[in-house]
Amino acid sequence: MITAKWTPNFNTREIYNEWIGKSWLELEGTIAELGEYILSYMQQFITNRIHRDGSTGNLVRSINIEYWSQGAKETLAGEAYAGWGIGKMSDMDKDAPYWYLINYGGMSFIAKFGLGVGGSFNGEAPDPMKAGSGVGTQRFGSGNFVMFPKSPILPMGYIEASRFELDKNINTIIAKLKG
């Protein structure tokens, strides 16, 4: 019987120190720059596709970036990470609760059943000339009007477009690291 044992002739710690450790600050800066670029890309994507006059900009302002980072020398196990997240859903739910409908399209749960929903455009009644006839003008609570949506919101796809742009840029960064 012949047995063989193969042991890799490399040390992961050495590879990390040689390839990533030396340029960690540069890589961390590149990741931060990519986050700022994607945030700007998403906000501009939305701004360029606004359909109605008088937009408040609440959706664009509700989308922010949050960073996190820890260098390899700061951790016990030696791992390092850097990253960011764009669009904290809890903040967006509070500041622009319609973010989901704008991205994915459709109608609110209540509107799907043909029921009136309370709402306004900056405190003003919906303009029947802009949204079609039969739009409610009766008051519904404080500052809102009864509105009867007749057609679904068309999807804007700002999340998917930003994800595509992110993937494209990550591939560029990986190609630079390899070359």
Image: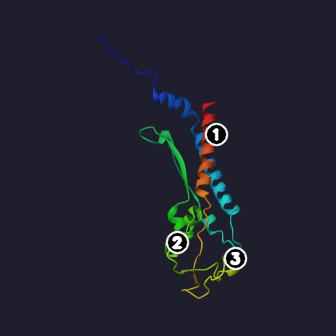
Q: Residue at x 61, y 58 (%)?
A: 158
x and y percent of residue 151 in the render? 60, 72
Q: Residue at x 63, y 83 (%)?
A: 134
Q: Is residue 29 visible?
A: no
Give the mark, 3 or 1, whose residue is nearer the N terminus.
3
The residue beneath circle 2 is 108
Kind of residue indicated by mark 3: Lys
Relative vertical location of residue 54 with respect to residue 99 in this rendering, above or below: below
x and y percent of residue 173 in the render? 62, 39
Q: Is residue 153 left or right of residue 7?
A: right
Q: Residues within 10 Å of mark 3 (few under 14, many from 20)?
A: few
Closer to the camera in the image, 20 or 160: 160
Q: Is residue 36 visible?
A: yes
x and y percent of residue 96 in the render? 57, 69
Q: Quadrant of residue 122?
A: bottom right
Q: Which mark, by number, is residue 130?
A: 3
Location of the C terminus by quadrant is top right
Give the mark, 2 or 3, whose residue is nearer the N terminus.
2
Q: Nearer the viewer, mark 2 or mark 1?
A: 2
* Colour scheme shown: rainbow
Relative vertical location of residue 122 with respect to residue 94 in this rendering, above or below: below
Q: Which mark, by number, is residue 172?
A: 1
Q: Secondary structure at mark 3?
A: helix
Kind of residue indicated by mark 2: Ser
